[in-house]
């Protein structure tokens, strides 16, 4: 498993994507029963969520930490599958 320097950039793009933030809103409701209306997660919240999920302090670590990179790829894959299922 090789770390990928592009993961840090991809994480930034993902956090700016309104569909990803909507995914986080809906995931919070479905997985945790949270009272989170659509539009709750901000770009900053998304970044915080990715860093916490990947166990890192900075997105730059996605390029050097193999485990964090693998976790990030899982996040990307789950989001892309969700997006494919939920397109209008």
Image (cartoon, helix red, strand yellow):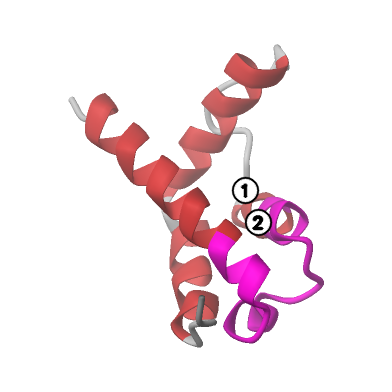
Image location (x, y in percent) of residue 65: 68, 79
Q: Which residue is rendered at x = 70% and y = 12% of the image?
A: 33
Query: Does residue 66 show up magenta in the picture?
Result: yes
The secondary structure that most of the magenta stretch takes on is: helix
Task: Check disc 1 and report its element: helix, strand or loop.
Answer: loop
Task: Check disc 2 and report its element: helix, strand or loop.
Answer: helix
Kindly identify which residue carries mark 1.
42
Q: Residues within 10 Å of mark 2 (few under 14, many from 20)?
A: many
Q: Which residue is rendered at x = 58% and y = 84% of the image?
A: 63
Q: Which residue is rendered at x = 78% and y = 69% of the image?
A: 56
Image location (x, y in percent) of residue 41: 62, 40
Viewer-side residue, 25 vs 27: 27
Q: Is residue 86 above or below residue 83?
A: above
Residue 17 can be seen, yes or no: yes
Q: How many marks?
A: 2
Image location (x, y in percent) of residue 59: 66, 75
Q: Is residue 33 left or right of residue 70?
A: right
What segment carries the magenta color? 49-70
Q: Which residue is rendered at x = 77% and y = 55% of the image?
A: 52
Q: Is residue 12 above or below residue 37?
A: below
The quadrant where residue 44 appears:
bottom right
Viewer-side residue, 11 vs 18: 11
CA distance for labels 1 and 2: 12 Å
Q: Is residue 34 left or right of residue 81?
A: right
Kindly identify which residue carries mark 2.
50
Query: Does residue 10 show up magenta in the picture?
Result: no
Question: Of the residues under marks 1 and 2, which one precedes in the sequence?
Answer: 1
Q: Say which quadrant the C terminus sits in.
A: top left
Of the two numbered discs 1 and 2 in the rendering, the one whose residue sits closer to the viewer: 2
Image location (x, y in percent) of residue 68: 66, 67
Q: Is residue 5 left or right of residue 42?
A: left
Q: Residues within 10 Å of mark 1 (few under 14, many from 20)?
A: some
């Amino acid at each position: 498993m090789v770390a990928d320097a592009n993961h840090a950039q991809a994480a930034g793009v993902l956090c700016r994507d309104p569909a990803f933030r909507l995914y986080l809103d809906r995931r919070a409701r479905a997985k945790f029963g949270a009272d989170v209306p659509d539009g709750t997660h901000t770009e900053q919240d998304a970044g915080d969520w990715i860093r916490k999920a990947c166990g890192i302090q900075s997105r730059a670590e996605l390029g050097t930490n193999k485990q964090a990179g693998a976790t990030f790829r899982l996040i990307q894959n789950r989001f892309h599958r969700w997006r494919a299922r939920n397109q209008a």
